[in-house]
Amino acid sequence: HDALSALLEMAEALVEPASAEDRLFDENTRTGVSAMAQRLAEMTARVVGCEHVGIAAVEPETTRIIPMAIVSPDPEEHRQWWGRRSHAPRLSDSSDPAWAERLRAGEVWHGSPRNLLFNEEPHPFQLPTLLIAPMRVGKQLVGLLSLGCDSAEHVYTPQEIALVGAVAKLTAL
């Protein structure tokens, strides 16, 4: 029930009448986009039931991965996440070039964040396993939704992976 309520809130947030915050979002100001991204990250955490959620934009021209929002109980993850704004890695900087191609193709990636290095720098979420879902508008990759659970025993089901992919598509809108 909580997941359905959060999904409905996400849909409402995307279509509600223009408030002051939405006008900021429409004008593409950083404050408005970040506020909306943070709200969507918090709702995503509720929908999926994970403690760690990150939303990053992917610049079309440069493929820089720009942090937009984070939900995490770990202050160090917050520091590392926001620290990447000043030196955002590019998709092409990944230690696994096929990873970026799979994301561009719309696949949800599932694996150890230790295997994801960008210029020798690991993903800020140092969890046993991580899901990274592409946020695409049409065929254009516009962002990445990263999430993970604290429990080392958590095994993502095909249904959870599909849900994360659907949430990423909704968030991209």
Image (cartoon, helix red, strand yellow):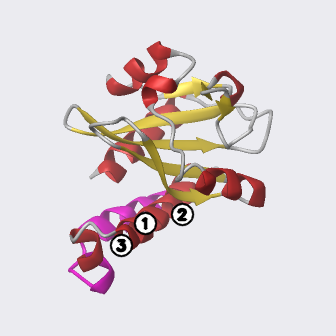
The CA distance from mark 2 to mark 1 is 12 Å
**Who comes first in sequence, dot 2 or dot 3?**
3
Residue at image mark 1: 34
The image quarter in which residue 116 lies: top right
Q: Residues within 10 Å of mark 1 (few under 14, many from 20)?
A: many
- Which label lies toward us, 2 or 1? 1
Describe residue 60's horizontal placement relative to residue 130 as left or right: left
Give coordinates of residue 42: x percent, y percent.
54, 63
Relative to 9, say whether 119 is above or below.
Answer: above
- Give the numbered dot on residue 21: none
Give the residue drawn at x 67%, y 43%. Answer: 124
Describe residue 38's horizontal placement relative to residue 119 as left or right: left
Give coordinates of residue 25: x percent, y percent.
28, 70
Give coordinates of residue 97: x percent, y percent.
47, 15
Residue kind at label 3, given as amino acid type: Gly
The CA distance from mark 2 to mark 3 is 16 Å
Residue kind at label 2, given as amino acid type: Glu
Give the residue drawn at x 34%, y 26%. Answer: 104
Residue at image mark 2: 42
- Asked if disc 2 and disc 1 are in contact, CB closer than 8 Å, the reply is no
Residue kind at label 1, given as amino acid type: Ser
Residue at image mark 3: 32
Q: Which residues are magenta?
A: 1-22
Describe residue 96's horizontal placement relative to residue 144 as left or right: right
The CA distance from mark 1 to mark 3 is 5 Å
Residue 106 appears in view: no
